[in-house]
């Protein structure tokens, strides 16, 4: 059974940076697409960034120019580099892998932006 797990969340000051990681296990090399979502308190879960197998990426307007999704195919891990963080970025961040047409979600990692 394929699982994904996020790491790298935490508390950061406004203007700071964090890098989230999401690893799939067992190691497989046929993930069709990866995506990062987030859910702030009282709000719906929203797509932050996505990457398909061919490498094309997409971003929410609110994070364009600040966040970057990337992957390490050897480690079967996807990353979300987050720069210039602000309070509106505070949320639980979830990783999703699409494998054999199934969505596989992680448990989420908390990101809190506060001084």
Image (cartoon, rainbow, N blue to C red):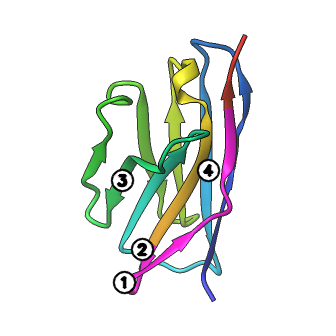
- Apparent side of residue 80 relative to residue 53 in the rendered image (left or right): right
Mark 4 is surrounded, within 10 Å at the Cα level, by few (under 14), some (14 to 19) or many (20 or more) other residues, namely: many
Rendered image: mark on residue 21: 4
Residue 112 screen position, x and y as percent: 69, 29
Residue 91 screen position, x and y as percent: 60, 38
Q: Residue at x 63, y 89 (%)?
A: 1
> CA separation, marks 1 and 3?
15 Å
Residue at which label 1 appears: 101
Q: Secondary structure at mark 1?
A: loop
> CA separation, marks 4 and 3?
14 Å
Above or below residue 62? Residue 43 is: below
Q: Earlier in the sequence, mark 3 or mark 2?
A: 3
The answer to whether marks 2 and 1 mark residues whose Cβ atoms lie closer than 8 Å is yes
Q: Earlier in the sequence, mark 1 or mark 4?
A: 4
Rendered image: mark on residue 39: none
Mark 2 is surrounded, within 10 Å at the Cα level, by few (under 14), some (14 to 19) or many (20 or more) other residues, namely: some
The residue positioned farthest toward the front in the image shown: 42
Q: Which residues are magenta?
A: 98-111
> CA separation, marks 2 and 4?
16 Å
Mark 1 is surrounded, within 10 Å at the Cα level, by few (under 14), some (14 to 19) or many (20 or more) other residues, namely: few
> CA separation, marks 3 and 2?
11 Å
Q: Secondary structure at mark 4?
A: strand
Q: Quadrant of the C terminus?
A: top right
Q: Earlier in the sequence, mark 1 or mark 3?
A: 3
Residue at which label 3 appears: 50
């Amino acid at each position: 059974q394929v699982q994904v797990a996020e790491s790298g969340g935490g508390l950061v000051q406004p203007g700071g940076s964090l890098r989230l990681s999401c690893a799939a296990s067992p190691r497989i090399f046929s993930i069709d697409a990866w995506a990062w979502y987030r859910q702030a308190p009282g709000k719906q879960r929203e797509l932050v960034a996505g990457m398909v197998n061919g490498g094309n990426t997409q971003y929410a307007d609110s994070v364009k120019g600040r966040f970057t999704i990337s992957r390490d195919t050897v480690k079967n891990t996807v990353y979300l580099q987050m720069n210039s963080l602000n309070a509106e970025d505070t949320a639980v961040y979830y990783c999703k892998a699409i494998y054999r047409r199934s969505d596989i979600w992680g448990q989420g990692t908390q990101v809190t932006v506060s001084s």
